[in-house]
Amino acid sequence: MKKTLLLGASLLCSVFIMATEIPFQKAEIKSIMRKVADWQIANPHPAPEHDDLNWPQGALYVGMVDWAELAEKEDNDDTYYKWLTRIGRRNCWQPDKRFYHADDIAVSQSFLDLYRKYKDEAMIIPTLARTEWIVNHPSEGSFKLVEGDLKTLERWTWCDALFMAPPVYAKLYMLTGEKKYIKFMNCEYKATYDYLFDKEENLFYRDWRYFDKREANGKKVFWGRGNGWVLGGLVEILKELPKKDKNRKFYEELFVKLATRVAGLQHPDGFWHASLLDPASYPSPETSCTTFIVYSIAYGINEGLLDKEIYLPVMIKGWNALVSAVEPNGKLGYVQQIGADPKKVTRDMTEVYGVGAFLMAGNEIYKMAR
């Protein structure tokens, strides 16, 4: 009898372990990451929004830094670090042109990461000059975003901005120890949260223009990639702030709340779609929101913020879906094009920010793979 009970307990334990283990091998994850990264480098986007310092490239570089670190550590391959460094040098490590605009400081995230590695002051000085002025002369612009009115784009008045700018200030806080950076980030972030976060749905509106809009099914308009941007930005902030830092609690609690809500909106095909609450109107997969969400869930599992037993199946299904969207040559498909709300997507569509987030997700999943 005792042997039977022990055997039963052993089998139950084995089933539980198998249910909470990741089925992926490190080698296969690294292989698909390399393929996607190499395709993107070999096929730069031709559109004018893709100059070296534009925000789509800024998001790509964040993922490329993650991949560069992994490739150097595991394969002694510094090719990707050299690629990133060449981009910074030919632009003198400057952020983009619009002074207060969150999009135009997105590239500084990777520049600061490269500074952390190489300790070359040229990599950090232009970002310090930009942020020093902004912190000491904060904008009082309106939160009612109007396209073409730059004054309404000086603060973080659209949810995408929460990926673009806040991690820069979190990094500067940790690099310099100066509290003015974290105080500024906290103030501006919480102002955006108070304005754009729907506390009934636990999701972010893209901006104020969507407060009263409705999808075809009558649901509120919550953009998949928009909420993905927010989750990805929260991960970048949490990666910087130490566990005991008093500033961390707000971001950690918001991350868990948003990740929990979004995880429950995963489509049976493993993807998240362009509209979170009306996927039937946008039935195609959408990889730019899916990459950011998978990245965030993987991070949450790795850091113990999300229950592994509950969220690992969500992450596994999401990663398998993403891999299915990669062509044999490494091109990532089903990426919604530049925009501000849900739009239809086709497999042939790709974008650099989708690739960046794919590499971020792969990097987190690699940590837990066999």
Image (cartoon, rainbow, N blue to C red):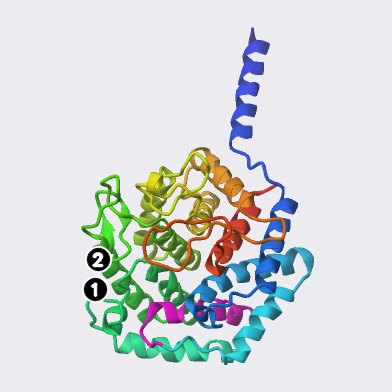
Label 1 Cα neighbours within 10 Å, binned few <14 / some 14-19 / many ≥20: many
Mark 1 lies on a secondary structure that is loop
Judging depth in this view, the residue of 326 and 74 nearest the camera is: 326
Looking at the image, can residue 320 be seen? Answer: yes
102 on left or right of 53: left
- Which residue matches tag 1? 143
Mark 2 lies on a secondary structure that is helix
- Which residue matches tag 2? 208
Residue 129, located in which quarter of the rendered image?
bottom left
Q: CA distance from mark 1 to mark 2?
A: 8 Å
322 on left or right of 260: right
Residue 355, located in which quarter of the rendered image?
bottom right
Ranked by sequence position, the earlier of labels 1 and 2 is 1
Q: Position of residue 325 (x, y in %)?
A: 61, 52
313 on left or right of 84: left
Picture layout, residue 250 above or below residue 180: above
Please name the amino acid that badge 1 sits on.
Phe
Residue 291 lies in the magenta-colored region: no
- The stretch of residues the image draws in magenta is 98-117
Q: Position of residue 121 (x, y in %)?
A: 57, 90
Please name the amino acid that badge 2 sits on.
Trp
36 on left or right of 130: right
Label 2 Cα neighbours within 10 Å, binned few <14 / some 14-19 / many ≥20: some
Circle 1/circle 2 CB separation < 8 Å: yes
Residue 100 lies in the magenta-colored region: yes
